[in-house]
Image: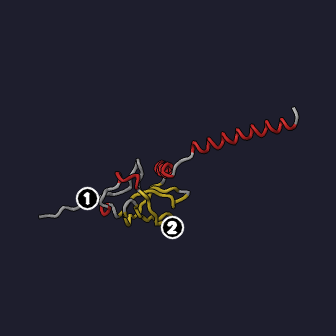
């Protein structure tokens, strides 16, 4: 074989491999919703439990704070995909919560996921006649 033919065959093989790689990457990429679900799942499975304080509920976002090793964290969690886990009346859950966080990255935390909830739901007091 001549060097030109070898070069063309090598270039064709490289092009085929590059196309296959692009197809594999494109086929298996995750959507943001899939990545968030996977993050919640890993926190549920690997996370340490801690105590926190739910400070506010606005639409589909829970705002909470907690402390790990003397460092205070103030964060939020979007619960749009988990609305069935959160009561419609947000005032019933404001207060103490249990959360899960990663020991190697305590800023990565959740209060609720598909399999678990750290919300402490109070019942509305009924007036005494």
Query: Badge 2: how crowded within 10 Å, few (<14), some, or many (20+)?
Result: few
Residue drawn at x 84%, y 35% as measured from the top left: 5
The one of 70 and 42 positioned closer to us in this rendering = 42
Judge from the rendering whether residue 59 lies leftward or rightward of residue 19; answer left or right.
left
Q: Quadrant of the C terminus?
A: bottom left
Residue 52, image x, y percentages: 41, 62
Residue 60, image x, y percentages: 38, 59
Judge from the rendering whether residue 12 lies leftward or rightward of residue 19; answer left or right.
right
Write down the residue under mark 2.
71
Q: Secondary structure at mark 1?
A: loop
Residue drawn at x 43%, y 65% as measured from the top left: 65
In the rendered view, would you say 85 is above or below 61? Answer: above
Q: Secondary structure at mark 2?
A: strand
The one of 62 and 67 positioned closer to us in this rendering = 62
Does residue 55 show up?
yes
Q: Quadrant of the N terminus?
A: top right
Judged by depth in the image, the label closer to the viewer, 1 or 2, is: 1
Mark pair 1, 2: CA separation: 32 Å
The one of 61 and 69 positioned closer to us in this rendering = 61
Residue drawn at x 51%, y 61% as measured from the top left: 107
Write down the residue under mark 1.
123
In the rendered structure, are the residues bearing label 1 and label 2 in contact, judged by CB atoms less than 8 Å apart? no
């Amino acid at each position: 074989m001549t060097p030109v033919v070898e070069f063309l065959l090598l270039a064709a093989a490289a092009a085929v491999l590059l196309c296959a790689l692009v197809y594999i990457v494109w086929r298996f990429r995750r959507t943001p919703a899939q990545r968030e679900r996977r993050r919640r799942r890993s926190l549920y499975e690997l996370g340490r439990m801690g105590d926190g304080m739910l400070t506010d509920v606005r639409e589909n976002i829970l705002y909470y704070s907690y402390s790990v090793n003397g460092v205070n964290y103030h964060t939020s969690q979007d619960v749009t995909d988990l609305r069935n886990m959160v009561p419609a009346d947000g005032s019933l859950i404001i207060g103490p919560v249990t959360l899960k966080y990663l020991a190697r990255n305590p800023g990565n935390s959740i209060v609720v996921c598909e399999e678990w909830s750290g919300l402490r739901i109070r019942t509305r007091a009924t007036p005494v006649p």
